[in-house]
Image (tube, helix red, strand yellow):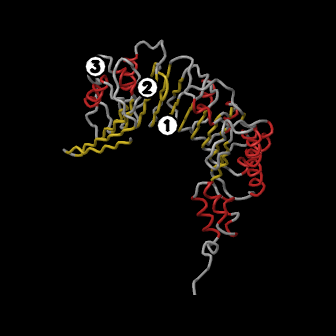
Amino acid sequence: MENNTDKLSSLPELLCLFIISLLPFKDAVRTSILSKHWLHIWKYSPKIEFSENFDGNCIDRFEPFSSIKARRSAFMKFIKLWLDFRKVGEVEKFSLKFSKPNNDHREIIEECVTFVTQHGVKELELDFSDPFWEEEVIPNKRKALFELPKLAYGNKPNIESLKLSSCSFRENYLSNWQALKEVTFGWMEVTLDAMTIVLSNCKMIESLVLHKCWNLSHFEIGSEALSLKRLVVDKCSFRNALFKVSAPNLCFFKYFGKLCFFEMKNTLAIEEAHLHFYLGYDNVGTGARVMYDLVKDLYNARVLTVSPYLIQVILTGEKRRMEHDMNARHLILRMNMLRCELRAVSFFLLSCPMLECLTFELGSEIILPDYQAMWIDSVSCVIIWMKNKMIYHCGLTV
């Protein structure tokens, strides 16, 4: 006779909990349909991620208000039921994402923060941004849609990773967060004073990410005691075109934004640098020199990405190569196949004598309109040097 034993239901509970801990939260929830034995196991997942777009479908901006209200109500009820159920068990990560909260949602948000403080959560993410804001290149200067509840600042929380999107905070209160190692701020006002206070009080911060933040007078960080290893500044708005960094432990640097006057000092530990610019400030009249000095300051990076804007601007100068050899082993050239960019290959090959891998990322972005472009929608080409052989691997997507 066939053995109809339900093997999933017969698994030891500890093994079931281990399986749940390895799954993304939404997949853990889906295990509830396997059997009665699995009905509630997902609620003990150590990685909690409540997202209004749990099913992967964003709320349509033209969706009727009554429908949006019903979805929001069901979402809040789902969170409330989980909070009422989950009283014990370790929680490593807690993430809450939904757009445009109002005072009606304050109670449930404060309950979530209370849960975080009581269960020693190490990763906290609160994202209240509107998904349709992603359509904008530079954010409108909106106020953050919510403020981090006061409950979060007390009793020296164990949080090591903090991600806030359109959720303002009180920088002076963060002095209690001594365990912080990773900080991400997005879609909100972040002043230079606030950033300085956070970095000086939370001395263990190793990663700082700013995504579409505004009201920075300029960007400036620097201290011999700075633990920062990873810095990402993505499409932020500065009132003054000045970007100063002195970080002796910095290994990873990524900048995507307008051209500034850069001062990258004390960055000998740099391993990866990714530079992507769009049209710069009008008052930056010495673009070629600014770009050249920036690349020179990052000469020690083993992985280097440069954008079409940087390539086209730096080649308006008279230099045929960098004054000193670059340490790049992997060079990524984002190009548009303009005539003026052909010199870039020669420029960087001469500047990078230790190069092992050269990657071309070709697109259709035009920065300087005086040249004719070859329009290629999506092409990637990688050239790798191994001993005395050249191996070409190219892929084309039409």
Q: Which residue is mark 2?
A: 265
Return the residue found at the far bottom: 1
Give the side of residue 163 with respect to residue 348, left or right: right
Q: Amino acid at mark 3?
A: Lys
Instruction: Judge the density around disc 1: few (<14), some (14-19), many (≥20) Cα neighbours within 10 Å.
Output: many
Q: Upstream in the sequence, badge 3 or badge 2? A: 2
Q: Position of residue 324 (x, y in %)?
A: 29, 26
User: Which quadrant of the figure has residue 370?
Assistant: top left
Q: Which residue is mark 3?
A: 319
Return the residue found at the far left: 388
Q: Nearer the viewer, mark 1 or mark 3?
A: 3
Cα distance between the residues tagged 1 and 3: 31 Å
Q: Which residue is mark 1?
A: 230
Is residue 96 depicted above or below 201 in this figure?
below
Cα distance between the residues tagged 1 and 2: 15 Å
Cα distance between the residues tagged 3 and 2: 22 Å
Q: Upstream in the sequence, badge 1 or badge 2? A: 1
Pick the front one: 289 or 5: 5
Pick the front one: 107 or 209: 107
Contact between marks 3 and 2 (CB within 8 A): the answer is no
Q: Position of residue 269 (x, y in %)?
A: 41, 35
Q: Amino acid at mark 2?
A: Lys
The residue that appears at 39% across and 27% down in the rendered structure is 308
Instruction: State the SS at label 1.
Output: strand
Q: Position of residue 380 (x, y in %)?
A: 35, 40
Q: Position of residue 319 (x, y in %)?
A: 28, 19
Instruction: State the SS at label 2.
Output: strand
Pick the front one: 249 or 214: 214
